[in-house]
Image (tube, grey):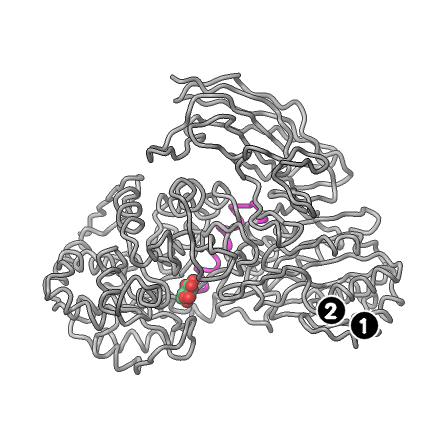
Amino acid sequence: MLRRLFLHGLFGLSAVLVAGTEDRVADLMARMTLEEKISQLVQCSSNDELTGPRGERSPLMAEIRAGRVGSLLNVVGARETRRMQEAAVTGSRLHIPLLFGLDVIHGFRTTFPVNLGQAASWDLAAIERAERVAAIEASAAGVHWTFAPMVDIARDPRWGRISEGAGEDPFLGSAVAKARVRGFQGDLSGPTHILACAKHFAAYGAAQAGRDYWTTEVPEITLRDTYLPPFKAAAEVGVATFMCAFNDLNGVPCSGNRWLLDQVLRKEWGFQGIVVSDWGSIAEMVPHGLAADLKEAARLAALAGVDMDMEGQAYLKHLPELVRAGVVPMAQVDRMVKAVLEAKAKLGLFENPYKYCDEAREQRDMLRPEHLEAARDLARKSFVLLKHDPAVLPLRAGARVALVGPLADAARDQLGMWEAKGRPEDAVTLKAALEARLPGLVVTAPGCAVSEASRDEFASALKAAAQADVIVAALGESWDMTGEGHSRSKLDLPGSQQALLEALKATGKPVVLVLFAGRPLTLEAVLPQADAVLYAWQPGTMGGPALADVLLGDVSPSGKLPATFPRNVGQIPLYYNTKPGGRPQPAGPREQYRSNYLDTPNTPLFPFGFGLSYTRFAYTDARLSSPEMGLDGRLTVQATLRNLGDREGDEVAQLYVRDLVGSVTRPVRELKGFQRVRVPKGGQVALSFELRASDLAFTHTDGSFAPEAGRFQVFLGGDANAPLVGEFTLRAQ
Ligand code: GLC
C-alpha cells in the first residue's frame, strides 16, 4: 500500500514523494557503482538537433546502452523516446530510465507569443494556461522536462534573450514565474505534467552592453532585490529544477558559484531538486579562466552544487577520479544522484519508463482547437497599442486595405525563436487572416525584405497603397534577430523598412503600423510615420487571427509593456524602478549640473506598464484605508476605475510605492500590485489592493531583509508614470 509522504521545505514546498519511492531510490543507490552514479549526472543532446556549440560527438546509442547517460535533451517523439528509453532500460545493468528534456519555451507544437509578449498581457491565468497546453503537447511527444521558465530580469533590450523572459520588473517577473511553473508541473502526477526549470540562475540578463554570455557585475543588494526574486518565486511554488547560467557573476561563473548554488539556493531557499548546467557551461569555466582544465572545472561545479552536466563531458571524464581521490566527497555525489533519481521517481518512470511514450496521444493532442484558441486569446491580450487615432483604428468596415511589409505573410518569423516543434505551415499569418476576414478588400505587397537595403520593391508597395483607403504596414524583426546569441547594437527598424514606412506615409493615406519584434525597439523615428502603432511581438501560431480580431475591432488592445522602451540605445540601461540620484533632472527643460544628456531627454519613449486602448479609463476616488501601519500591519488602496469610452475594454491597473528614505537608497517607484480587469462600456469597477508591511521589505547593507519605518508614497494608474494617490507612514513597531 503506497502511503503519500508530504515533505515540507522552508517555503511550505511540498514535495510529494510516494513513500515507496524513497525506499526504492535508497535501494537503487545502494546497488550502484560509482561510475553508474556519475552516469546519472550526464546529459547528452541528440546529435541531430543541437542547441549549443557542436563539441566532440559520441555515438549516442552506444553511450546509452553502456549506461553512461542519465538524461537526453533534444530527443522528441513518442516513438523515438521509446526507442532510446528501451536501450537505456534494457541495456543498462540496473535498468534506470532516462529523463528527456527539451526547450519548451513558448509552446510545443501550438506556438504561443514569445514570452515577453505573453508578459505584456499581465494575464497570469492565460500564461498558466499556455504552459498547461505546452505541457500537454510536449508530454505527448515523450518530453519529461522543459528548460523553462526563463525568469531572467532584463533591463537591456540589446540582449536578444529579453524576448524569453518577463521583462524588467521583479514583481511582475515573480508572478509570471509562478504561473508558468504551475502550468508546466501541476501536481506532477503526470502524464501531462512535466518538470519545469527556472533558468538561467542567475543575473544572466545583466550581461554588460547587452552582449549575450558576457560578464555580469551585480552588487548583492541589486542581485537579491532585482534579479533573484523570480527564481525565489519559482522555488516557492516547487519548481523541480534550476539551470545555472553561463555568465561570470561578480568574478565567479555561475556554474562554479558555491555562494549562489549552495548558500542561496539550497541553504536559504531550501531547494532540493536538480541543478542542471547550461550547455557546456561547466567546461566553459576553463575559457572563463576560473578552472585550469576540465578536471578542475568538474571539481568546482560538483562542489558548488551543479548536479547534471549538460553536454560538457566534465563529470563523465573526471568525477570518478575526483571522488576516489577524496577531492569531491562521495556524500556530495550521492546527494546529486538522489536528486536525479527522485525527479525520475516523481514522474513515475520507475513504475513505467514508457509512461510518456504514447503514440496515440501524440496524434490526438497536438494543435487541438482549444489549444489554438488559447494561443489566439493570449496573443490578442499581448498586443500593446503604442499610438492611437480612433479615425484609423479599428479599421473601418468596407475599407480597402493595402497590407504592406516583409512581415505581413511571414509564418516563420511570427513563431519567434525557441519554437520547439512549432511549424510555419501551422501558423496563420496576418495576410491570411485579413484576406479571410475582408474578402476582396485586401491588396498586398512586401515592399522590402526584413534586413536588406534594397528599395526595388517600394514601387509595388506604393501601387498597392494607391488602390487602398488605409495602409497596414507589417514591419519589424525576423525570428532570428532575438533569442540566444542574437544581441543587437542598434534597435532601429532593420534594412530599408524605415524608408519604406516614410514612403508610405508620404502617400497621405492613413498608416497603421503593426510591429513584430522579440524585444523593445527604438521608435523615435518611426512614430511620426504612422497614425497608429500596434506592437505585436512575435505572436505565434495564431498571430494572424489575433491581429485581425484587434485591427477589426472585435476586441480592444489591452497589453502593457513589461519593459521600458528607450528613445535610443544611448539611454540604455533605462528602467522605471531606478534610484533617484543626488542631482536628478527635474521634469522639463535640461538643467545644468543635473543628471541628464545634452542630446536626449532622460525619459523613455514609452514607460514600463504603458499601453493604450480603444476606449479610455479614469481612476477616481482613490483612497488608503489608513494613513499608517505597523511593521506587521497592512492597509488597502481602493479606487474606482471608470470606462469613459463607447466600448468595453480591459485595463491593467498598476499599484506602485515609493519608500522615501531608507538605510540604502530606494527606487523612485516599485510595482507592488496589478489587476487586469474588464470594464463594460460606460461602466466602472471597484479596485482594491492590499499592501502589507512585509511587501515593503528590501535587502539592507548587513544582508538582512526587512521593511523600514518611514514615509511612503502610493501611485495608482495604467503605467509606471501613475499619479500619486496617497501617502502613509510605516511605524517602527
Ligand atoms: C542553450 C540555452 C539554454 C537551453 C540549453 C539547452 O544554450 O542557454 O537556455 O535550455 O542550451 O538547449
Element on which disc 1 rests: helix
Residue 92 in picture, x, y percent from top left: 19, 75
Which residue type carries mark 2? Ser
| Residue appearing at x 52%, y 57% in the figure | 210
Residue 65 in picture, x, y percent from top left: 23, 79
Describe residue 344's horizontal placement relative to residue 602 as left or right. left
CA gap between label 1 and label 2 equals 10 Å
Viewer-nearest residue: 20 or 314: 314
Element on which disc 2 rests: loop
Residue span colored magenta: 120-138
- Compared to 363, does 555 lie above or below? above
- Alpha-carbon neighbours of circle 2 within 10 Å: few (<14), some, or many (≥20)? some
Looking at the rendering, the quadrant in which ligand 1 lies is bottom left
Instruction: Work out which residue is located at the far front of the displayed protein and give it.
Output: 593
Q: Which mark is residue 458?
A: 1
Disc 1 and disc 2 in contact, CB within 8 angstroms: yes
Describe residue 643's horizontal placement relative to residue 424 as left or right. right
Q: Which mark is residue 496?
A: 2
Viewer-nearest residue: 721 or 357: 721
Q: Is residue 84 magenta?
A: no
Which residue type carries mark 1? Phe
Residue 714 in picture, x, y percent from top left: 56, 27
